[in-house]
Amino acid sequence: MQEQAQRLQNLINALKTNQLRLSKKIGVPYSQTNSIFHGKAGFSSGYIKKLSLKFPEVNTHWLLTGSGEMFISSERNEIDGLVGERDAPYKKSINPLQISPYDKDDELRKTLGNNLLGLVITWEMKKYQLFEIIMPGVAKQSISNYLSGTSQVPLYALIRLERITGIAIIEWITREIKSGELPPEPTPGITKQDYLIRELRALLDRVGA
């Protein structure tokens, strides 16, 4: 969280503003910005969404991970894509110009859950197999909560989801992602077969084979 705090401090300086004005501008409580600023909390998906809506030039992937530059331009966006890896095969804008705004976190969670279900279908996986990729060791009850939108997927898992699909976090939580936009399998180097093999090995271990 300290690294995210430092990046927020750098961003505030670059925008020539302060915590209070930034909070008012993006519509979040000052206490939330202050907690992130001092390393007491990390960015929430709602905070990132509101910041992206007001400051589309800010590279939210950089803000979350430190990868890439602080600001992006439309020209660079088309070249670099959203994940900051030039050789990634599936890329979209990190800050899309047209997104559907939501006022409530539960709507963001439901949108994310529906998109994750669509990904499960596209990749022809079981639900737990998808979450084993983005959240190894997650409990099955938690998976049900994430897919139904009753619980928020942790930020680190959303970052992982962005990296293996090439679709920005902001897209996952604010709009319906069509099946044709999804990559045919996880990237880079993570395939459905890898996890099926691991499940088979685990089964053999349980039966003592």
Image (cartoon, grey):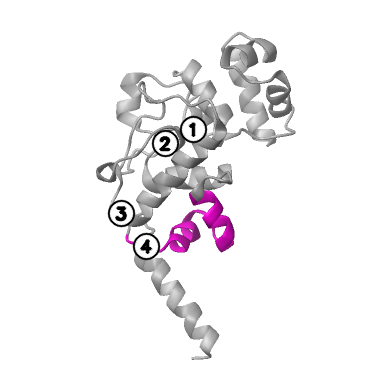
Estimate how packed mark 1 is, as few (under 14), some (14 to 19) or many (20 or more) residues with alpha carbons within 10 Å.
Answer: many
| Disc 4 from disc 2: Cα separation | 21 Å
| Disc 1 from disc 3: Cα separation | 25 Å
> Could you say which quadrant of the image residue 2 lies in?
top right
Looking at the picture, does residue 173 appear above or below residue 160? above
Q: Are marks 1 and 3 in contact (CB under 8 Å)?
A: no
On the image, numbered disc 2 is attached to which residue?
A: 168
Q: Provide residue 153's location: percent of width, then percent of height.
A: 55, 46
Q: Which element carries disc 2, helix, strand or loop?
A: loop
From the image, give the main secondary structure of the stretch colored magenta. helix
In this rendering, which labeled residue sits more in front, label 4 or label 2?
Answer: 4
Q: Which element carries disc 4, helix, strand or loop?
A: loop
Residue type at the position of mark 3: Thr
Q: Disc 1 or 3, which lies upstream in sequence?
A: 1
In the picture, the disc for residue 125 is 4
On the image, numbered disc 1 is attached to which residue?
A: 61
Residue at horizontal 36%, vertical 51%?
A: 119
Q: Disc 4 or 2, which lies upstream in sequence?
A: 4
Residue type at the position of mark 4: Met
Q: Are marks 2 and 1 in contact (CB under 8 Å)?
A: yes
Residue at horizontal 74%, vertical 27%?
A: 38
Q: Provide residue 190's location: percent of width, then percent of height.
A: 39, 58
Residue at horizontal 54%, vertical 60%?
A: 136
Estimate how packed mark 3 is, as few (under 14), some (14 to 19) or many (20 or more) residues with alpha carbons within 10 Å.
Answer: some
Q: Nearer the viewer, residue 90 or 68?
A: 90
Q: Which element carries disc 1, helix, strand or loop?
A: helix
Looking at the picture, does residue 161 appear above or below residue 58? below
